[in-house]
Image (cartoon, rainbow, N blue to C red):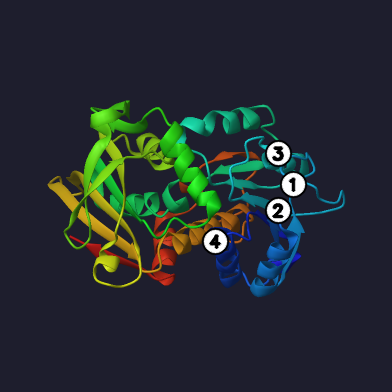
Amino acid sequence: MSSKFSPVLIIGGSGVVGSQAAKAIRRLHPGLPLAIGGRDLSRAQAVADEVGGAIGVRIDLDRADLGLDDNAAFSAVVIFVKDERLTSMRYAQNKGIPYISLSSGTFEVGPEVAQYIHAPDKAPILLASHWLAGAAIFPVLDTLSSYETVDAIRIGVLLDEEDMGGPAALADYNRITGKAPASLTVKDGKLHWASGQEARARYRSVDGVELDAAAYSPFDVMALAARTGAKEIRLDLAYSVSASRRRGEPFSTEITLEIAGQAKDGEPLTRRHEIVHSQGQAPLTALGVALAVERMLGLAGGEAPKAGLYLPEVLIEPAYYVSRMKEFGTSFVDH
């Protein structure tokens, strides 16, 4: 079925996470053609050869045509680097093909929204700058099926100091943590920007060790605010040592969820969920991108979406996403 498509263009596909995303897409859809895009053609081609069923292409984000041949045809564009000019988004809109972006902070969403508003009928645009492309928000939404109402959602994420990924991921982290005026939270039912002392937090790792953390605002917070109406929502990031590395093992990535509300039977319900991937953040980000691609192309979950502006949680079923996380090696422990 997927062989009828033109290649999916993965800009930044030769990087640490982009290459894993290409492999995740290949695992889910062996016949879907891919184009691995990067500044260095030889590196892009090397990844393409490793993935199979793929080509390498050189990308120049300073050019309106991305430096590609006029006759180049793609079925979607995925970008793993911050495109300050939004050249890649306009390219996808001009081609009328889906576009998936991953690298924006909440405070940076305005330019992408404005670009969509000025060309709303050209292409489906998916803004997927959630934590690890959805690895936190989808387990939250899946868990909420047990609740009648939800009052508070507290997400803790741990990024191991040895698990930053490649230069693009480091640039995103430094830009967002360095330039964001504050981090978006929900406090007393109101959208609230936390900074200074208020942004500081403690993260309890899956082995019980407490670590310094700080409020962080990928798209999860604003998306959960829109979706749930919870009066308290916060995501805290600990950039430290994972529990697995404290045990002398390789780094892992951790996500903890603490959700309070009312159960279906009317009783108060508070639960803690611990989510771990033993190979770190890259496999979960890669999976999130692969699931976004298959949904945007109509390969799973329904027909391909029409031109519009989307967040992944309005297109992908939480239970399906979580089942794929488990299939790709993620462990879940409920308390």
Side of 290 relative to 9 (left or right) = left
- The residue mark sitting in front, 1 or 3, is 1
Q: Earlier in the sequence, mark 4 or mark 1?
A: 4
Identified at 29% across, 59% down, the residue is 241
On the image, numbered disc 2 is attached to which residue?
39
Cα–Cα gap, marks 4 and 3: 22 Å
Amino acid type assigned to the residue bearing label 4 in the image: Val
Q: Earlier in the sequence, mark 2 or mark 3?
A: 2
Q: Earlier in the sequence, mark 4 or mark 3?
A: 4
On the image, numbered disc 1 is attached to which residue?
60
The image shows residue 219 at horizontal and vertical percentages of 43, 40
Cα–Cα gap, marks 1 and 3: 9 Å
Crowding at dot 3, Cα within 10 Å, few <14 / some 14-19 / many 20+, comes out as some
The image shows residue 246 at horizontal and vertical percentages of 24, 66
Residue 184 figure quarter: top left
Amino acid type assigned to the residue bearing label 3 in the image: Thr
**Is 106 in front, or is 2?**
106
